């Protein structure tokens, strides 16, 4: 076990109002996604890091915005609990999860493991490495087991079907986050020459050669708890970890359900709303937002493949606002 250093803990202390009901769920999910552990009612602890500090500062603001109270402290345990005692809360759970991932990967070796199952293990490991800031030794074994599994697995590439090229992609007018991001993905991974048409919801009859997205009855739209961007990514680039990280940000901004708890979501969301406020022209919105999404995607490509903050179990998106929810 790695001993915690002095002043290496963040304490998130909060008190929530009775209403709105979703706030309690939102806070719990975001804390879980960050890997925080409860040490007392409404007091959570997390190893100190710049990214954790930023994420918890955003959560403090979100709680205050909803009428609650929250504080963030940097602390060292000197009595009652020791730093080592607190570190043990994290080590035990994280070590068990790393071992479970390694066993699952080894069990799948030598089989025709479904690509979706392998990707799920990749995401599971990435979520854990994103919150493991104490250097749990079992991490190396899990990473090695997953690499062996990926090496043994057949090459998995999802090429866009020819039928999706040369088509007109139809969506609702007034594009915002999910539709902006989806249009970028379509031109980036499906058809560089894709044409877009913007229609009034409920007043469009699909014509031959059209593909509808992010709209009722569309060929590509929300499925379960996944936004349209996630559905498109799973269809056309399922093995792209950089795209998956971008999808988590889009999800957190678009659905505001606290699923991934991406710290970048609030800033990116503000940029998207800024684009929307600067012009009502949907084609211009797509053009401006495409540059933003391309830059974000490139930034993830420069990072280690499994080092992104893929926070699946829960977390809270940093983009709850009083304005219309983007779709």
Image (spheres, rainbow, N blue to C red):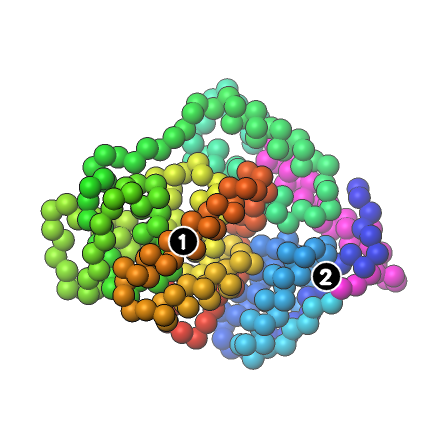
Seen at 41% across and 63% down, the residue is: 272
**Is 74 drawn above or below residue 314 in the view shown?**
below
Relative to 33, 173 lies left or right: left
Relative to 70, 223 lies left or right: left
Where is residue 279 shown, x and y percent of the image?
A: 32, 69
Quadrant position of the N terminus in the picture: top right
Does residue 82 belong to the magenta stretch? yes
Magenta part of the chain: 74-102
- The part of the image, by quadrant, that contains residue 112 is top left
Which residue corresponds to mark 2? Answer: 10
Seen at 69% across and 40% down, the residue is: 95
Secondary element at image label 1? helix
**Is 169 drawn above or below residue 166 in the view shown?**
below
Secondary element at image label 2? strand
Front residue (pair 164, 126) = 164
Residue situated furthest bottom in the rendering: 67
**Is 142 drawn above or below residue 82 in the view shown?**
above
**Is 276 drawn above or below residue 252 in the view shown?**
below
Residue 281 visible at all = yes
Q: Which mark is residue 84?
A: none
> How dense is the environment of label 2, judged by Cα within 10 Å: few (below 14), some, or many (20 and up)?
many
Where is residue 27 shown, x and y percent of the image?
A: 57, 65
Front residue (pair 135, 297) = 297
Does residue 116 belong to the magenta stretch? no
Relative to 267, 209 lies left or right: left
Which residue corresponds to mark 1? Answer: 291
- The part of the image, by quadrant, that contains residue 15 is bottom right
Of circles 1 and 2, the one toward us is: 1
> How dense is the environment of label 1, judged by Cα within 10 Å: few (below 14), some, or many (20 and up)?
few
Which mark is first along the chain, 2 or 1? 2
Seen at 72% across and 41% down, the residue is: 136
């Amino acid at each position: 076990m790695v001993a915690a250093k002095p002043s290496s803990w963040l304490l998130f202390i909060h008190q929530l109002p009775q209403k709105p009901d979703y706030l309690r769920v939102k806070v719990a999910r975001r804390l879980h996604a960050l890997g925080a552990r409860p040490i007392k009612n409404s007091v959570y602890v997390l190893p100190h890091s710049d990214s954790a500090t930023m994420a918890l500062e955003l959560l403090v603001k979100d709680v205050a915005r909803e009428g609650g109270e929250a504080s963030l402290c940097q602390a060292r345990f000197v009595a009652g609990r020791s730093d080592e005692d607190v570190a043990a809360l994290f080590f035990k759970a994280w070590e068990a999860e790393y071992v479970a991932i390694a066993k699952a990967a080894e069990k799948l070796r030598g089989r025709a493991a479904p690509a979706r199952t392998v990707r799920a293990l990749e995401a599971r490991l990435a979520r854990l490495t994103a919150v493991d800031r104490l250097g749990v030794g079992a991490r190396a074994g899990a990473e090695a087991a997953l690499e062996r599994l990926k090496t043994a697995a057949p090459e998995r590439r999802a090429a866009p079907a020819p039928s999706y090229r040369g088509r007109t992609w139809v969506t609702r007018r007034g594009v915002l986050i999910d539709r902006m991001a989806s249009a970028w993905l379509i031109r980036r991974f499906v058809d560089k020459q894709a044409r877009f048409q913007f229609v009034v919801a409920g007043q469009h009859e699909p014509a031959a050669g059209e593909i509808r997205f992010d709209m009722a009855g569309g060929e590509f739209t929300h499925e379960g708890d996944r936004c349209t961007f996630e559905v498109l990514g799973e269809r056309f680039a399922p093995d792209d970890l950089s795209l998956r990280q971008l999808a988590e940000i889009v999800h957190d901004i678009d659905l505001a359900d606290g699923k991934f708890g991406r710290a970048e979501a609030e800033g990116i969301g503000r940029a998207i709303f800024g684009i929307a406020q600067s012009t009502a022209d949907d084609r211009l919105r797509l053009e401006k937002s495409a540059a933003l999404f391309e830059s974000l995607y490139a930034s993830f490509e420069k990072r280690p493949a499994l080092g992104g903050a893929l926070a699946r179990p829960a977390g809270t998106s940093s983009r709850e606002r009083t304005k219309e929810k983007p779709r």
